[in-house]
Image (spheres, rainbow, N blue to C red):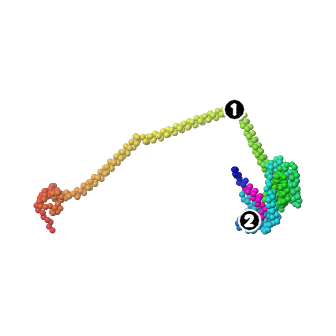
């Protein structure tokens, strides 16, 4: 199952056809808001109520026909049709009539008429317009601007298209009869007509109202050939526009529709002509160059030049090889020197020399430290010796004192530590005395 994928423009154009084909001849009541006038003279405003907002536009050429003053906050009733601005993707109500109250009978009848025509299918039949029309019948005023615009564009943009003009009166009292009569005559033509164009230049709403006549619209619908309605300006729409097989915004637009494929074909042919001419010239030039190359004299010169170029190329190649070879050798020599330095730095002899220097340095340091330690220890020893000698009990013997020891060689400090008959020793400076205790005298208190 295939799914249709729209482009943005395709979908927008279809939406426009739905909006403009179904929402026309509308009466809308609301309050004016955001009123403004563009630099081109068109008037924009919104119609609002308590729940919604609708954008509106009044084109410059419609402003003189309005019988009311527009101002923000004013409640009005407008008559118009929905229109989609394709490039901006915005829809607005294209206003054709404004009044303060009530509904004009003229517009009311037209709205009713459009509904009736739509219900009967007058708006639904859309016959295709031939892609390359050869004979076009134009129903218009022979002295108006419309026929001048149509013929000028067709003659400029196409070739071989035959334009037939059936004069009609497009305004005045006999306009209706003239238009209907011309449409009926069209059906009597036995020769093939590719397209029938009903055209009228721009004008006021009243000037174009004749094309809202139901009899004219029915007569246009009954034409046996495909029809294009090209009435007024782009902003104008009439009953005939909806009945015709295709609507053109202006008579000029109708001519462009008829000639667009032909113009594209002419442009394509011109493009192919240019491409073909360019290709032929290129081939001729190429063959001429080949011919010049293969001529005797040019061939010799070309061969000589070819050899010279190759000789120069070989010289440059040899120079390049020698240069690269020298650069390669220099690079290798540089790397060898770097590796030699690394080997020399990391050789066992170099490391042993470093270790020997470190051991010698450490030996000197150890000797220095040992001497210092010995000096400190000897100094302390001398100090301790002096203290010991100073504190030694034997030192008092030099002063004429003596020390008496018991049989266990313990100093006798108290007379109660010995008994009569005990053997005792008395230490002197130059010897000792051994004696027995024969008498003990207690200390006298």
Q: Which mark is residue 342?
A: none
Q: Quadrant of the C terminus?
A: bottom left
Q: Is residue 327 left or right of residue 290?
A: left
Q: Position of residue 431 (x, y in %)?
A: 15, 55
282 vs 305, nearest the viewer:
282
Q: Residue at x 77, y 58 (%)?
A: 21
| 23 falls in the magenta region | yes
- In x, y percent, where is residue 174? 89, 59
Graded by Cα atoms within 10 Å as few (under 14), some (14 to 19) or many (20 or more), the crowding at tag 1 reads some
Task: State the residue in front, 24 or 61.
Answer: 24
Residues at marks 1 and 2, CA–CA distance in whole angstroms: 86 Å
Instruction: Please give the name of the residue rendered at 26% of the width and 54% of the height, measured from the top-left corner.
Output: 382
Q: Quadrant of residue 47?
A: bottom right
* Residue 8 x %, y %: 71, 54
Q: Secondary structure at mark 1?
A: helix
The answer to whether one can see residue 338 in this image is: yes
Q: Position of residue 235 (x, y in %)?
A: 78, 59
Viewer-nearest of labels 1 and 2?
Answer: 2
- For this orientation, the residue located farthest to the front is 1
- Residue placed under numbered mark 2 in the picture: 47
Along the line of sight, the residue nearer the viewer: 304 or 144: 144
Q: Secondary structure at mark 2?
A: strand
| Mark 2 residue crowding within 10 angstroms, few (<14) / some (14–19) / many (20+) | many
Left or right, 327 with reference to 178: left
Kindly indicate whether the residue at mark 2 contacts the one at mark 1 (C-beta within 8 angstroms). no
Which residue is label 1 attached to?
299
Residue at the outermost left position: 438
Q: Is residue 381 inside the magenta stretch?
A: no
Give the extent of the magenta segment.
Answer: 12-32
For marks 1 and 2, the one nearer the N-term is 2
């Amino acid at each position: 199952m295939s799914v249709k994928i729209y482009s943005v423009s395709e979908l927008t154009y279809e939406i426009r056809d739905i909006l403009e084909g179904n929402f026309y001849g509308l009466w809308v009541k609301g309050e004016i808001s955001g009123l403004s006038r563009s630099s081109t003279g068109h008037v924009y405003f919104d119609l609002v109520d308590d729940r919604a907002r609708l954008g509106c536009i009044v084109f410059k050429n419609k402003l003189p026909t309005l019988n009311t003053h527009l101002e923000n906050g004013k409640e009005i009733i407008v008559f118009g049709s929905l229109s989609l601005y394709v490039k901006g993707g915005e829809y607005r109500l294209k206003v054709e009539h404004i009044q303060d109250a009530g509904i004009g009978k003229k517009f009311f009848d037209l709205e009713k008429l459009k509904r009736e025509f739509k219900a009967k299918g007058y708006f639904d039949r859309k016959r295709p317009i031939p892609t390359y029309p050869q004979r076009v019948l134009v129903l218009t005023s022979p002295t108006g601007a419309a026929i001048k615009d149509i013929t000028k564009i067709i003659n400029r943009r196409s070739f071989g298209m035959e334009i037939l003009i059936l004069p009609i009166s497009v305004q005045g009292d006999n306009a209706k009869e003239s238009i209907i009569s011309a449409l009926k005559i069209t059906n009597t033509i036995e020769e093939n007509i590719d397209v029938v164009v009903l055209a009228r230049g721009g004008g006021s709403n009243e000037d174009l109202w004749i094309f809202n006549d139901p009899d004219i619209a029915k007569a246009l619908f009954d034409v046996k050939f495909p029809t294009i309605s090209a009435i007024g300006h782009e902003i104008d729409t009439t009953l005939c526009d909806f009945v015709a097989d295709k609507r053109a915004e202006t008579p000029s637009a109708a001519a462009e529709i008829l000639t667009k494929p032909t113009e594209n074909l002419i442009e394509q042919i011109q493009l192919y002509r240019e491409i073909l001419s360019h290709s032929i010239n290129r081939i001729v030039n190429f063959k001429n160059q080949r011919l010049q190359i293969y001529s005797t004299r040019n061939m010799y010169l070309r061969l000589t030049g070819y050899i010279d170029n190759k000789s120069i190329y070989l010289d440059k190649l040899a120079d390049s090889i020698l240069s690269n070879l020298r650069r390669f050798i220099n690079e290798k020599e540089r790397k060898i020197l770097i590796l030699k330095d690394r080997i020399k730095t990391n050789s066992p002899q170099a490391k042993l020399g470093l270790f020997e220097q470190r051991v010698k340095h450490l030996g000197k340091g150890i000797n220095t430290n040992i001497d210092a330690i010995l000096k400190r220890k000897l100094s302390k020893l001398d100090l301790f010796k002096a203290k010991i000698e100073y504190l030694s009990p034997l030192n008092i013997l030099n002063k004429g004192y003596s020390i008496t020891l018991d049989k266990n060689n313990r100093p006798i400090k108290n007379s109660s530590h010995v008994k009569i008959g005990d053997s005792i020793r008395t230490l002197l400076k130059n010897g000792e005395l051994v004696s027995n205790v024969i008498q003990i005298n207690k200390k006298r208190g």
